[in-house]
Amino acid sequence: MDRVKFSALGDQALVIDFGNVIDEKINDQVIALFNYINSNHFPGFIEAVPAYASLTVFYDALYISHHIQIESSVLSWVENELMKMMPKSEIKKETESRLIEIPVCYDDEYAPDLRWVAEIKGITAEEVVQSHTAKTYRVYMMGFLPGFAYMGEVNDNIDVPRKTNPRIKIEAGSVGIAGRQTGIYPIASPGGWQIIGRTALRLFDPRKTEQSVFQSGDRVRFYPISQETYLAQLNGYT
Amino acid sequence: MSIQIMKSGIQDTIQDRGRVGYRHLGINKSGVMDNYAFKVVNMLVGNKLNDAIIEMHFPAPTILFERETLIALTGADFSATINGEEIPLNHPILVCKNSILQFQKKMNGTVCYLAVRGGFNVSKWLKSKSTNLKIVYGGYHGRALKKGDVIKVKATSKLSREVCEKDFVVLPWQTEIFYNRNENKEIHVLKGPEWDYLSEESKKDFMINLYSILPSSDRMGYRLSGPTLVSKSENEIISSAVCFGTIQLLPDGQLIVLMADHQTTGGYPRIAQIVSTNLSKIAQKGSRDKIQFTLVDQMVAEEMLIKQDRHLVQLQNACSFKLEEYFNGK
């Protein structure tokens, strides 16, 4: 924990930085503290946002200044509260996190960049699919769009850079790769990730009680399906 | 009671303070751009401070009030008229049934707020009535208002002293006019988590130079044009949370200020953060306006927030007292 750094993000939020790297152990600490804070609010707590290696905590500075005797700044009081919490947060065992399986159709029609990825990496399209479906990924963080999960890390043999010119529109359900990350666009959006497939699962639905299929800390596996199955699922889900 | 949009503006949305508590799922907060004008407009008509209002940009809409109602406008001055006659900002105004509100010309500011006594009655999603344009949900069908839309107003205790014989009555008190966009360029900021990524020279450049707001700016963010700043470290960070008012350094050395519809996370260095009390000020600036950043420390920013809050509490008390006195003759 000695690498932990606190910095203000304005007058009503602070960032706890656990080390500027993408690492499962560090992400475990972030998610553990996120879970702990959510069930042990300090007065004035608003919400916390876990990211790869940082947890940002939003607080109500007015509430705190009205209800608590503060010696210096509200920020340092919040910092102190968080310091007290940090040793108490416990990291879940991997088996305690959810495993979510995602059916993906990797057919050309839904995978505009699959052949390009194969070509640049000197492998076949089938090998790209094999590689993508071989691993269990971790949801490191949510962000960018409602329900968008940043997952990682993909095998070296399919690690490709983002597109130089982002696409104006990527269809909802598109599965992409960006460096060591993989992710799915929950809604149609502009974007720069290399698209290698599509799922019929609806990953974000504002009408549901659980709007997002994913949350930070989940484990995710992809499995290939035929176009026929994809279309059947699409009709079933919409 | 309801109002009707007779002609749409460029982007009129139902907003409140925004959706709180869902950023961890990537759900952005949305909400008003100018939180100060939003609170004041609700106070003027005796609403709760978080009641839903209409946020308008210019060109603004034409609105029909089907019944007699108490309204107020705050924020940007778009030369509002009722049935062709000018009406002022920052006053409660009693309008008669079948009155038409129009906006003639953009004089000052960027976002104007319309409150109707009772507040707009759209369904809440995740505890908020704000419109989320990105996922087309929340507010009024998740979108900007269009011609023909009818928006319900919550029923509330009737204010009945005045019989509305004229087109409208401007009640004889006003809240102060807070904005003067041409004279006040100063925006107070705190150092951001990646402030020290900037070279010493770039730190100076950031503070002494004027920045102008580019025309491509919107509810998501304001692009700035100014001196090119240099990062001593990487051009990108591992994605982390951002918020309203975060100033990010883009790879080309220019800056972007994240506004009300910002994403929840970002990968560019967060070199500075606008203090809460100055978010309204930047929200009212627009294309080609100039701003200058002044660095303050944490205690100063917190004191500014407490002071502004105290002022708002006094204003709210005064507004309810005046309304009570006017309508109930106390």
Image (tube, coloured by chain):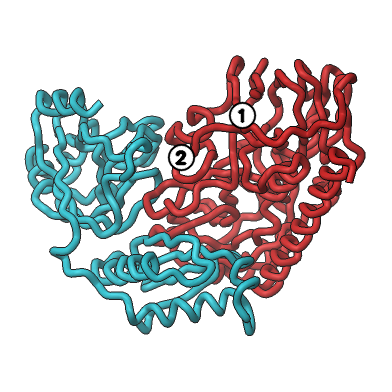
Residue B89 is situated, as x and y percent measured from the top left of the image, at 83, 37
For residue B248, side relative to residue A39 (left or right): right
Question: Quick one: A161 or B189, which is closer to the camera?
Answer: B189
* Residue B182 visible, this orientation: no
* Mark 1: secondary structure: loop
Query: Which of pointers 2 and 1 indicates the residue nearer the eye?
Result: 2
Residue A20 is situated, as x and y percent measured from the top left of the image, at 37, 69
Instruction: Identify whether A193 is placed above or below B265.
Output: above
Residue at the outermost right position: B172
User: Looking at the colours in the rendered structure, which chain would you say is drawn in red?
Assistant: B
As drawn, the label of residue A210 is: none
Determine the residue positioned at 80% across, 21% down: B96
Please name the residue that numbered disc 1 is placed on: B11
Q: Are marks 2 and 1 on the same chain?
A: yes
Determine the residue positioned at 15% across, 33% down: A105
Residue B37 is situated, as x and y percent measured from the top left of the image, at 73, 45
* Residue A36 visible, this orientation: yes
Instruction: Identify whether A33 is placed above or below B83.
Output: below
What color was chain A assigned in the picture?
cyan
Question: Quick one: B289 or B152, which is closer to the camera?
Answer: B152
Please name the residue that numbered disc 2 is placed on: B125
Determine the residue positioned at 14% across, 49% down: A221
Residue B90 is situated, as x and y percent measured from the top left of the image, at 82, 41
Measured in 3D between alpha carbons, the distance from the residue under mark 2 to the one under mark 1, in whole angstroms, is: 20 Å
Label 2 crowd bin: few (<14), some (14–19), many (20+), radius 10 Å: some
Mark 2 or mark 1, earlier in chain? 1
